[in-house]
Amino acid sequence: MDTLIMKEIKVNVKDFSITPGSRYRDEGVKAHSGQEFREEYLEPIFLNIENNDSIIIVNLDGTIGYGTSWLEEVFGGLARKFGKDLVQNKIDFISNEEPYLIDDIKEYIKHA
């Protein structure tokens, strides 16, 4: 009997920045934008896992907070690029500090 082993790829937002900032890169050199996080961190991982059983676990804890535009750009943008179904199936979240963020993000993905 074969056992399915799912590989979890962990991404900690705090490793990118403890102060996630603007939506777009052009809103400041050190803006720690959602666009930058999506393009530099999540998209390369997605390109490597879209055809296998791996999932991404995004840990949202350890930052000072999030703007809604940052979250929408990251996760809504990911859904626009890779498709809602794939993103919903390939990404999960940890947010012990602000658990409501997970529901917010799921809405951004759903409405992307």
Image: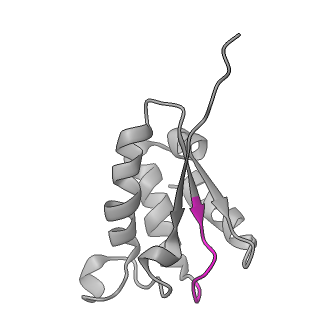
Residue 11 percent location from the top left of the image: 51, 62
Q: Of 23 and 48, which appears nearest the observer?
A: 48
Magenta stretch in the rendered image: 58-65
User: How many numbered circles are shown?
Assistant: 0
The residue shown at (41%, 73%) is 34
Residue 72 percent location from the top left of the image: 50, 68
Is residue 53 inside the magenta stretch? no
Residue 48 percent location from the top left of the image: 37, 40
Q: Please determine whether, in this image, residue 40 is positioned above or below residue 84.
A: below
Q: Of 43 and 86, which appears nearest the observer?
A: 43
The residue shown at (39%, 69%) is 37
Q: Please determine whether, in this image, residue 10 is positioned above or below residue 72.
A: above
Is residue 63 inside the magenta stretch? yes
Residue 56 percent location from the top left of the image: 54, 50
Compared across the picture, whether 59 is left or right of 32 comes to right
Magenta: main secondary structure equals: loop
Compared across the picture, whether 78 is left or right of 106 comes to left
Scheme of image coloration: one colour
The residue shown at (71%, 10%) is 1
The residue shown at (56%, 40%) is 7
